[in-house]
Amino acid sequence: MEFLARFRVALGWVFAPLVFILANPSTESIFVGAIVGFVGEAIRIWAAGHVNKAREVTSSGPYRYFAHPLYIGSSVMGVGLALASANPLAAALIVVYLAVTLRAAIRNEEAFLRKTFGAEYDLYRRWRRGTPNGAARRFSVARAMENREYRALAGLVAALLLLTVKQRIMGRFGG
């Protein structure tokens, strides 16, 4: 599991070309997929603007509602790309990739948080079930940038642009 968690981005580079090859995007599928994908990225930006990764247990922003909002955002982005690809097999590859790698990442992250923060992490988990601890912070664009969220945004934009290029080429050559 640790391997999958650690190399999930690299594995994405293996799956991405397969998804691209299988994709049969249309203007409409790209439009709908982009809307869904940007909603997922918005969730990620919101989360990244609240978390100090590996330095604390965060309970503000989307962490008040979800244990893993970055992964939820990634999943929504994946759904967006699946919709944009307009191919059931490509969508299945995306779902399998996300299900396997994010599950591993969540297990790995929770083990790290429990080992690193112990009782504080357990308190957070109890608080998420309804026992508030009152810890709050404001969203920070600088924090989101520090967490390198621009990389996920750039990846989403690049994927959508590649699908758009493929759609335009297919349309031009009757594909």
Image (cartoon, rainbow, N blue to C red):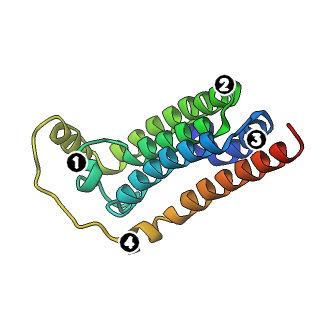
| Mark 2 residue type | Pro
Could you tell me residue 50's position as x and y percent?
31, 61
Label 4: state its secondary structure.
Answer: helix
Instruction: Measure the alpha-carbon separation of dots 1 and 4.
Output: 19 Å
Q: Earlier in the sequence, mark 1 or mark 4?
A: 1
Q: Give the quarter of the figure containing the C terminus.
A: top right
For mark 3, what is the residue?
Answer: 20
| Image marks 1 and 4: residues in contact by CB distance under 8 Å | no
Q: Secondary structure at mark 2?
A: helix
Distance, label 1 to label 3, CA atoms, is: 36 Å
- Mark 1 touches mark 3? (CB < 8 Å): no
The kind of residue tagged 1 is Arg
Q: CA distance from mark 2 to mark 3?
A: 12 Å
Q: Quadrant of the N terminus?
A: top right
Q: Position of residue 4 (x, y in %)?
A: 61, 37
**Residue ID at (56%, 43%):** 33
| Quarter-of-image position of residue 118 | top left
SS for dot 1? helix
Report whether 135 appears left or right of 72: left
Q: Residue at x 23, y 39 (%)?
A: 125
Residue 88 tag number: 2
What residue is shown with label 4?
A: 141
* Position of residue 171 in the picture relative to residue 73 (left or right): right
